Amino acid sequence: MWSLARSSFGALGGPLEREEDRVAKLERIQKRGRVEWVAPEGTHFRTVDLDVYSRARLTGLVEGFGDRMFVLHDGKWGSRYLASFELGNSWQLSADQEIRRLVALVHRLPPSARRLWTQAQSRVFDIGIDAGLKPRSQALKLSQDTIAGVARVQGRITITTYAPETYIEVGQQKRRARPTTG
């Protein structure tokens, strides 16, 4: 999910509104004279996925969003259809900012795509959190306006927490640990 090369948003991209909204999802480090961006350690906000479930194909919705969204999935998902999206170029936004931008994109859908949105069975703004051992707790804040915006487009908000990856050190390298069976 950590990608820096995605679509740009022009007017939607705008500057970060408030200092407290600034969330660096990637940390800048200098290594051997080069600048690298790495995922922060510990519990942190990952991204917001927009998942739309329907009995009908959602290709028209995907086309309605155009290149303003990164499409994670478009097709059959069990007995229904799923179109799953992420904002492109959102790696430095807070969950609140991402959701507000997603809602704005829904409002800008052309009529045919908006009909698919309205007729969908569910519209989920899924906030992804990478769990870590530290900090012990972390608050994720959403404004009243953001929550009201999701309600106006008939959406709901969920939070998905991803367990931390387990690594073991082998010599100078870290490798992902294999799960043990009891």
Image: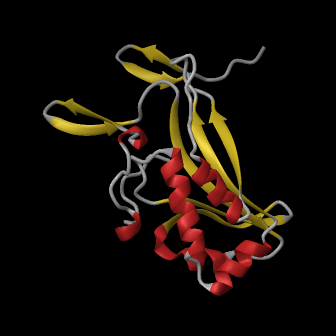
Placement of 62 over or under 141, stated as above or below: below
Placement of 52 over or under 111, stated as above or below: above
Query: Which quadrant of the figure has residue 83?
Result: bottom right
Looking at this view, is 143 or 15 the one in front?
143
Residue 60 percent across, percent down from the top left: 65, 81
Residue 25 appearing in the image:
no
Which residue of the protein is positioned furthest toward the right in this rendering? 79
Task: Give the side of residue 10 with respect to residue 96, left or right.
Answer: left
Query: Which quadrant of the figure has residue 178?
Result: top right
Looking at this view, is 4 or 115 the one in front?
115
Task: Give the side of residue 61 with respect to residue 26, left or right.
Answer: right
Query: Which quadrant of the figure has residue 160?
Result: top right
Residue 118 percent across, percent down from the top left: 75, 74
Q: Residue at x 43, y 48 (%)?
A: 93
Task: Give the side of residue 112 with respect to residue 22, left or right.
Answer: right
Q: Residue at x 52, y 37 (%)?
A: 45
The image's colouring method is secondary structure
Looking at this view, is 145 or 112 the one in front?
145
Residue 85 percent across, percent down from the top left: 58, 61
Placement of 156 over or under 167, stated as above or below: below
Residue 88 percent across, percent down from the top left: 45, 60
Q: Residue at x 60, y 74 (%)?
A: 62
Residue 109 appearing in the image:
yes
Please identify the quadrant where the C terminus is shown.
top right
Which residue of the protein is positioned furthest toward the front in this rendering? 144
Q: Residue at x 65, y 80 (%)?
A: 113
Task: Give the side of residue 76 with respect to residue 144, left or right.
Answer: right
